[in-house]
Amino acid sequence: MILGEVEIQQFLCSAQRGTEEKEREGALISLRGGLQHPETQQNFIRLEGSMRTLVGLLTSNQALLQLEAARCLHELSHSEQSAVAEACLPATSYLLTYLSGHSSDFIELCLYTLGNLIVESEAVRRQLLPQGIVPALAACIQSPHSTVLEALGYTLSQLLQAKEAPEKIIPSTSASSSVLGSSLPQYMLGLLQPGPKLNPGVAVEFAWCLHYIICSQVNNALLITRGALSTLGLLLLDLARAVQRSEDAGLELLVCPVLRCLSNLLTEAAVEAVGEQMQLRDERVVASLFILLQFLLQKQPSLLHEGLWFLNNLTANSPSFCTSVLSLDLIVPLLQLLPVSNVVSVLVLTVLCNVAEKGPAYCSHLWPGPLLSSLLDTLASSDTEVVGQSLELLQLLFLYRPEAAQDFLQQSGLLALERHEKETQLQDRVRALQRTALMR
């Protein structure tokens, strides 16, 4: 029910001055129902003294009134209007204070309310930082309650996604008022440790938090020294084992941020040292990744590119990871992913280029085999990137396996190339490949 200013005033007066606790609580429950509507939210913030009264009830020494006032604030926090979020500014210091309380339900409610307010207003974020939101969250992360930890992960993720996060929220390593300077990263990695105590809902929230920190590129070297690669690598193996046991309920929600974290961290570390930093053998990483790729193919094909991007980063500068792809006979499974989408095709072809550019010994595993016929299919694509990456792979193959060029010609390869001769973005590479093929 939409409430006008007069009705809001009446409910606030009843909540503040009612003679019986049930009457006061009931007034706030009615107000909360009205605040689910944007019109009521606007009427509430226009009413002079309304927020002051609600904050007064929030700080009441009567637990039920306090809870209902917090629930009213939570409804206001759902508004998509920054003006509504900013009207809640007088309540933020109290919400932070209550994070150190004893009721896990109340702490959870305060966390979600703060998280919602953070999304909508830079003014709220600007006020929360000096009020000590980061130390408050760092204290909360030690809670034994999974519901509190999930709520904390949500709130922290909203904070980390703020446009000012790389400059004002994530650094520096020495200030406890910043994320990297607090105990948050240490506890986040602890909550991502694989094993029977891993809570999937909590792990998903903090894996995304870690992803936002890594994407900021503020100090990824610090995360690596604290064991981020090792923790995430072990979690990758654990996820693959869970998939093999068919324990896959909601697993794709965790697979995506874990793959993104690993992919982005690889740009910070020497790839040849990754296996050692993960305390894993190359083959275990690659084998686990392919188990997850098959899982995503069945469950959520739209996430396949995440796994392939990780594989691309693994193999780009690493002969040992390329060797793992070959020794595990994964060329055919990779080729089978080509029809999924153009994005997937480009990534598969890029991975194969990574393997091919390592030289003749690697190319001997690519030809003879089904690769050429697959490339003839991708050359028929209308997507410029797919065709361009196919041309790149063929150039490498012909360079290191000249006999493959003859096979290509026998399979009408020149006809496949001719259809792209007039395409501006491709014609130079097409002509170069034609010359290479005819010279072999």
Image (tube, grey):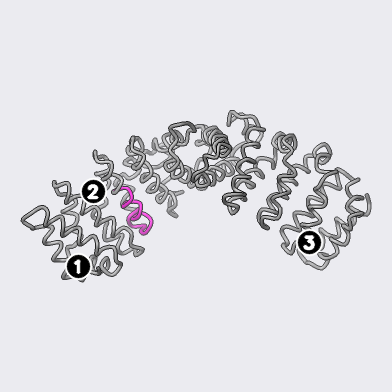
Q: Are marks 3 and 1 in contact (CB under 8 Å)?
A: no
Identify which residue, 233 or 433, lies in the foreground. 233
Which amino acid, mark 2? Tyr
The region drawn magenta spans: 110-125
Left or right of residue 193, residue 324 in this image? right
Q: Are marks 2 and 1 in contact (CB under 8 Å)?
A: no
Q: Which residue is mark 1?
A: 47
Q: CA distance from mark 3 to mark 1?
A: 66 Å
Tag 2 secondary structure: helix
Which amino acid, mark 3? Ala
Please tell me which of labels 3 and 1 falls first in the chain.
1
Q: Which residue is mark 3?
A: 380
Q: Which residue is at a point 81% across and 64% down the rendered structure image?
A: 420
- Disc 1 packing (10 Å; few <14; some 14–19; many ≥20): some
Residue 382 image point, x, y percent? 74, 64
Residue 125 image point, x, y percent? 35, 53
- Please, what is the dominant secondary structure of the magenta stretch? helix
Residue 372 image point, x, y percent? 83, 50
Left or right of residue 197, residue 1 in this image? left
The tag on residue 94 is 2
